Image (tube, rainbow, N blue to C red):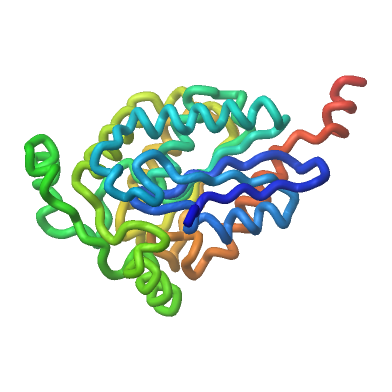
Amino acid sequence: MSLNFILKHADKPKGAVLLFHGLTGSPFELKKYGQFLYNNGYDVFAECLPGHGEKFEEIYTVKYQDWLEFGYSEFEKLESEYENVFVSGLCLGAVLALAVGMKFQNRVSGIISLSTTLYLDGWRLPWYKCFMPIALSTILKFYYNYPECEPHGIKNLKTRTAVKKMLAKGDVGMDNFPMTAFKELLDLSAFIRKNLNMVVSPILIIHSKEDDLTSIKSAEVVYKNISSKDKEYIVLYDSYHMVLYDNEKEFVFNKALEFLDGHAVSEKKEKVLVCA
């Protein structure tokens, strides 16, 4: 069963939105978000990142460079077809969206960064997380998986229960985080932090104050170090990590749409600009 999805309009859309999912997740976690954007005029593209998908065992050998190459390639495909190409992601996906923004700069119409994971310092992680850098630099990284556990990134109890059941079936993502994948995420995050000044596109950053996987520090570092003149940073107070499924999801959806509509260049706008 493929978890990828592409939503395209028969008539000309407002633009394309390239979505990236989170670590050990799948495009399923982006489905409602993508459907909402599609219903409001955008073509939406979401595919499994390298190391994810039906063959979960590939997560143990994937490198962060594979994620970068995938993100760059997917953006270039869409750029050849659309006037407006936006990138958005959750968790690892948000970090990858920033990477695309760094490489293609003004060619990216805008970036929506959700629960950006530059640090693994959320309140849910175990007390021994301080020893993680040591483990990641040894052979131990090949032998330990950190289990997905309560609250599964979701504050809303009803939604959390439903997601927990789906994870148990293995239909929508992995129920654990391999240490090897953690290492690749942290290596990618280190690369991004060193080059945040290269991000110049308009950007919307949304992060929960109570994010259980990555603290608000990640969003603050992005906001303070990017070069984008058009940037907005929103803090949520009634959600955990999975902001697209939690108590403030409608707010997140609407802010994302507001951002997209505010930065999509229409043919009408282009004609006025040319005539002037």
Residue 148 horizontal/vertical position (percent) = 26, 62
Q: Residue furthest front?
A: 1
Near-viewer residue (191 or 211): 191
At x 51%, y 28%, the residue is 73
Near-viewer residue (218 or 128): 128
| Residue 190 visible | yes
Q: Is residue 276 left or right of residue 153?
A: right
Residue 133 horizontal/vertical position (percent) = 13, 40
Near-viewer residue (175 or 193): 175
Rendering quarter of residue 40: bottom right
At x 40%, y 49%, the residue is 53
Q: Residue furthest bottom?
A: 158
Height in image: 139 above or below 276? below
| Residue 232 visible | no
Q: Is residue 35 left or right of residue 74?
A: right
- How many labels were placed on the picture? 0
At x 22%, y 39%, the residue is 183
Height in image: 242 above or below 106? below
Height in image: 194 above or below 30? above
At x 12%, y 58%, the residue is 127
Q: Is residue 205 left or right of residue 215?
A: right
Q: Is residue 113 left or right of residue 79?
A: left
Residue 178 horizontal/vertical position (percent) = 22, 49
Residue 5 horizontal/vertical position (percent) = 57, 50
Quadrant of the drawing holding the C terminus: top right
Height in image: 171 above or below 42? below
